[in-house]
Image (cartoon, rainbow, N blue to C red):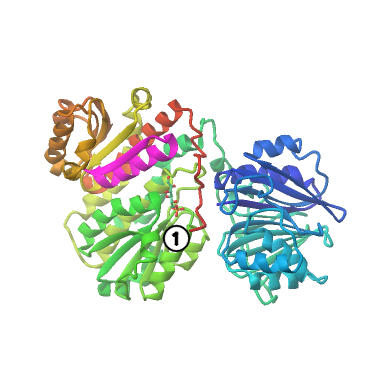
Amino acid sequence: MCGIVGFTGVRSAAPILLDGLKKLEYRGYDSAGIAVMDHHVISLSKVTGRIANLCEKTHDGKCMAGSTGIGHTRWATHGAPTEENAHPHLSNDGRFAVVHNGIIENYIALREELIRDGYHFESETDTEVIVHLIEMYYRGDMREALIRTANQLRGSYALGVLCSEEPDKIYAVREASPLILGLGIGENFFASDVTALVNHTRNVIYLEDGEFAELSRSSIRVFDGAGQEIRKKSTRILWDVQAAEKGGFEHFMLKEIMEQPGAVKATISPRIKDGRIVFDELKALIPALPNIRKIMITACGSAYYAGCAGKYALEKLCRIPVETQLASELRYSDPLIDEQTLLIVISQSGETADTIAAMKECKARGAKTLAIVNVVGSTVAKMADYTVYTWAGPEIAVATTKGYTTQISVLYLLALYLSDCLGLDSGKKAVMIEALQALPRQIQQAIDMNPGIPGLARKYHASKALFFIGRNTDYAVALEGALKMKEISYLHAEAYAAGELKHGTIALIEEHQPVIALCCNPLIMEKTMNNIVEVKSRGAEVLALTYRNNQKILSVADDLLFIPQIDPLFSAVVEIVPLQLLAYYVAKENECDIDKPKNLAKSVTVE
Ligand code: F6R
């Protein structure tokens, strides 16, 4: 949710912190602040709203002297987005400053105790208890103060801490919230996400839960929860810096939509060798496969919808029952999961709190866990028994696009791979592998075939509501299409299984009601066409998404979106692309903040 950064070196800290916060702004953007230390004095600057306001207030950091500091961009959980609640928080004696990402679950009890002990609170946040605890436990040794503080906290936290007694050091603490240390030359950094580090260094260390680090300009030392120093290996980030910049596009979202042919190719191509699917990372799973009786897919939001779309290929090709469950539901559902279940966990960020909790719950019941993740070294990636990475590159826009399509691509690959390992030969393997290899090209065609989308956006942008309908995989894509539309354009958009219309929803159809009908599966085309006729006869305006040259639809729909003709088992990954573009242009018409939609954050690290 929130983003944190830290820097210590010889350069002026404030501009570096502000630059890092701009890269993290997608994680939260309702208020922001930095604390910089200069000769044993900590100075603070905080604002409500965007990082741009903080840049203005600090004259791009020029009016804050000091070469050691921490910064924060907030997505409010406890307490409104005000300056008082913005981080960093300062101790009563002014010697300590803290930034925090996560939630302290027992903060109310801690706050009451601290108030009884004479500490006063400036904010309504859960975070403020941390800085007062550090002040209380500090007896000249920061490591001891951090360990004693961490022992009091329940919940999730990535912390950045300054202590004015140690003017050249920053401290970082991690428990269930991402935190990465960056190794520079004569300077060191930390951040919630590597995107804030890659402009300065490509050598990073991933902190694990329960670890903390002491960073000075010349060294990084990492300790376990008992204070024992531990040796950590650094990892080299191979992402291209350009990949985290807009590169001439008006929004990250548009750039990321356009990157999908490349991202899907990067995800699929290396896993096809000599006409077979190869997953070196799954070799250890093979012996357990014959005992698997059920596949459970869990995730949140779009990642969940990717699971809904991929389920069809898995079930059809592996002949194993596949269930899909939202992680936020699964975790509290006393699920029927055991050692004969393969749990597939899908997450772009790898840090989604509900997804992690559902995974823990199922692991405890004996399930084998296979994670499909984009962010390397993230919590989900590390927790899983087997991890398959999507190679989407950094996704910056809050609304996922290439994250989603690469997740479905992995599910297709998995379906073919597992069926091969199970010895199931559909006799069509070679054709199917060719079909997967064609997907990047077909995504590009789906982009090129629909130059009329900005015009359609002008037609539909002022609608009160949009309904998306479809059957089977078309329905799964309709769910994601409607989510894209609501989250970035704020239009009321709902997806319905087309066959369900008569069971209630058709009551909502009135004159000029836009209905977006997905008809990309020739086997059930007639059925969806019947639904189109039903809504049209009640006055609906139908925008159909179908494959090129589908003459039947041409005669019933008012407007059309196209994809090339594809095996319906694999078409979801292409079908979504015109719908992403439609949502993008509708949001643009409505002058919405497309990359940072209101009330949303990129990485939902709290429940
Ligand atoms: C919607 C969107 C969210 C995420 C969901 C899960 O565009 O991005 O619905 O898909 O919050 O996030 P990850 O995949 O990071 O676990």
Residue type, numbered disc 1: Asp
Q: Residue at x 18, y 54 (%)?
A: 428
Height in image: 65 above or below 359?
A: above
Q: Nearer the viewer, residue 480 or 373?
A: 480
Q: Residue at x 38, y 72 (%)?
A: 284
Q: Majority secondary structure of the magenta segment?
A: helix
- Is residue 183 shown to the viewer in this render? yes
Give x and y (percent) for residue 374: 46, 54
Give x and y (percent) for residue 477: 30, 44
Instruction: Categorize mark 1 by other alpha carbons within 10 Å: few (<14), some (14-19), many (20+).
Output: many
Q: Nearer the viewer, residue 62 or 313?
A: 62
Give x and y (percent) for residue 260: 41, 41
Residue at the limit of the structure toward the right, as seen here: 39
Q: Residue at x 29, y 42 (%)?
A: 495
Height in image: 69 above or below 228?
A: above
In this image, 386 relative to 96: left or right? left
Q: Residue at x 57, y 49 (%)?
A: 76
In this image, 474 relative to 332: left or right? left
Which residue is denoted by mark 1 in the rendering? 354
Residue at the limit of the structure toward the front, as seen here: 116
